[in-house]
Amino acid sequence: MTDLPPGGGWGEAARRFFLDLDARLTDGAWRLAGLIGRGWERLADLSDRVQVYGWKRFAAELLSEGATLGALGMVVLLTAAIPAFRETTDGDWLKKSELSVVFQDRYGNEVGRRGIRHNDSVPLDDFPDHMIKAVLATEDRRFFEHYGIDVIGTLRAVMTNARAGGVVQGGSTITQQLAKNLFLTNERSIERKIKEAFLALWLETRATKAEILKAYLDRAYMGGGAFGAEAAAEYYFGKSVRDVTLAEAAMLAGLFKAPTRFAPHANLPAARARANTVLDNLVEAGFMTEGQVFGARRNPATPMDRKDEAVPNYYLDYAFDDVKRLVAQTPALTDRVLTVRTGLDLAVQRQTELAVETVLRQYGNEYGASQAAVVLMDVDGTMRAIVGGRDYGASQFNRATEAMRQPGSSFKPIVYGTALREGLITSRSIVVDRPICLGNWCPQNYGRSFSGRTTVMSALVRSINSIPVILTQQMGRGDSRIGRQKIIQTAREMGITRPLTDSAPLPIGAAEVTLMELTTAYATFASGGRSVTPHAAVEIRNSHGDVVWRADRDMPARRQVFSAPVATDMNAMLVGVVESGTGRRAQVEGVQVAGKTGTTNSYRDALFIGFSSQYAAGIWFGNDDYSETNRMTGGSLPAMTFSRVMTAAHQGLERRPVFGQPDTSRPHAPPAAGTAAPAAGLSERPQVLSRRSQAVLGRIERLMRDAWEAPLRPGPVSAVDLQPPLLR
């Protein structure tokens, strides 16, 4: 063997390194084994010295096993509660996803509500002392003493229920009930109770007792769609919770346990019996004496009469959807309790409903039509009236905003408008009414004949079918598909958002749209070619009365879809339809109107869509089952109803011609002596307020509200003052 060179080389160095590492590991393992052995010997010696016998050994083993099982049980319970804790990841865990909206008409009068009835604007300091005592005496007497879970209260409830042979007293604390209201459901299960207990402990670490009590008073469901004591007081007694009497407070406190069973508007005897139980609890808990509650026993609370009133439900349904969309799109709208002033004109709404019902009663059987829908909006898109069907009680489906129907010839103005915008025609251009086929489809005119050379205006006034198809082909330079894409793009810009089926019959109204979208498209013509966004909300205030959204300030900017000359030309043709074409029955005395009729195959749907200088309206008649009518056209019942609706809408308004048109309307002469007075609610309708006048009235309203509330606002209080007097 040859000797290694001096220094050994890399191979020798690596060999020596690993030999050294092996020795060190072996030595470390031997030392660790010795250390463990000596430790085990010492532990065995210690166990021998503390070993117990007899009952002491049994008790020690029992405690040991109990601790082990308890630890495992806590791990299992915590694992079951983990899904509930995911609900608390939102930083604002008091935020409610449900909206509570009070709707007003255009003049600020309340007309209805949607969402939950909820109002959390009343501070805890403003709650009457007897209201807080009634709640604590009934729901959680030791609220300020426990830490989310009341073991003593739970044992007391178990004993009380055992003596009674049923469930007469609950063991859940207010904190547990709040946890359920915020994060859980009403499911009756062990799993829900486990989650509730852990979440109660979590809440106690995140909020003060005052905050928990306030949240409970504001979030609990109390029947009648009301959430929270303030909303319940307003609904049942027509007053703020600040002003409720002891008898009323007892009735409200009794609702927390079973709001449906004890709701006073549904079961007054049960509500009064429950209120009497709450008064017993007040005395038993030592919060009040029998003498103090005697008056409330002798004079029980009487709720308000909540009979159903006629409300514009179809309009409110649309307005609520409109508000939910705005809340989702507007970061500033974080409040869940809103007051919304809409564009609703209640007098016109009622006259519109009356017009629909009157026409259906008089002519519905004759024409075989059983349903109708109406949309009336300002030319800027503000909704004035919506009728979604004949009877909201029988069907809540909104045929004005949700029903997809073929528009028939009422779609043709969009085709003509596109051709005008492309520079292909003017209203005076000459076109040839002739046979045309696209594949196997050949459109036919109403009279099964063709007129030859005619003007564009005459083609629209007479509702010729072949001309829109020919224009579509010309817009695509011989390719109808390109022409239809241009029409679809124009329809999008005019406010039709639903997908339009690209088929050969599209130019004569084969694609399905909603009545709302079609009316919005016509409002583009009425407003001089500017796009329109339909909306019900005009102004939105939060729970503190601050304006957080205004249509004139926060709506998206309107774009110019058609130039003014194109809109003028288009409106001239649509005025001609009413004055000398298929829409003559839509004429309004003293008001220049424009529009277009529409009738679908087999007379299933009949429409009239039109406008004046101030309003756009869409009318639909037909049947829910798509059955055929008795040859009903858009120029019959829809045009007649349009005339009635627009007559009502223009009462007391300045008469102006349609955009770009000369004023050809006859002067509106006052009624002669002895003639019948206008229909009730029309001539008396207030004049339209300008935006400046509305802003001034809004400021006056805020000043009056501030002046009223100023004496009632309490001064600064300490955290201790938030507790009821008897519990401080």
Image (tube, rainbow, N blue to C red):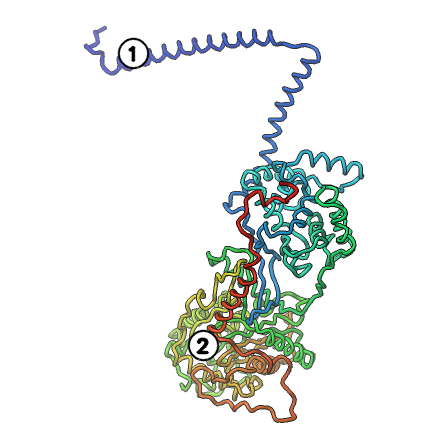
Residue 398 shows in the view? yes
Q: Which residue is drawn at 67% across and 13% down?
A: 57
SS state under label 1: helix
Number of other residues with Cα within 10 Å of mark 2, as a class: few under 14, some 14 to 19, many 20 or more: many
Q: Where is residue 312 in the image (x, y as percent from the top left)?
A: 62, 69
Residue depicted at x 75% and y 50%: 293
Q: What residue type is labelled 2?
A: Ser
The residue lying toward the viewer, choosing from 382 and 724, is: 724
Q: Where does the N terminus fall, quadrant-wise?
A: top left
Q: Nearer the viewer, residue 379 or 596?
A: 379
- Using the image as rendered, state which of residue 593 and residue 228 is in the foreground: 228
Mark pair 1, 2: CA separation: 95 Å
The quarter in which the C terminus is drawn is top right
Number of numbered markers: 2
Which SS class for mark 2?
Answer: loop
Sequence-earlier tag: 1 or 2: 1
Front residue of this view, candidates 643 and 21: 643
Q: Which mark is residue 527?
A: 2
Residue annotated with mark 1? 16
Which percent across, then down, holds residue 681?
62, 79
Where is 257 relative to 423, above or below?
above
Q: Residue 655 in the image: x percent, y percent?
A: 50, 85
- Residue 140 falls in which quadrant of the image? top right
Q: Which amino acid does label 1 sit on?
A: Arg
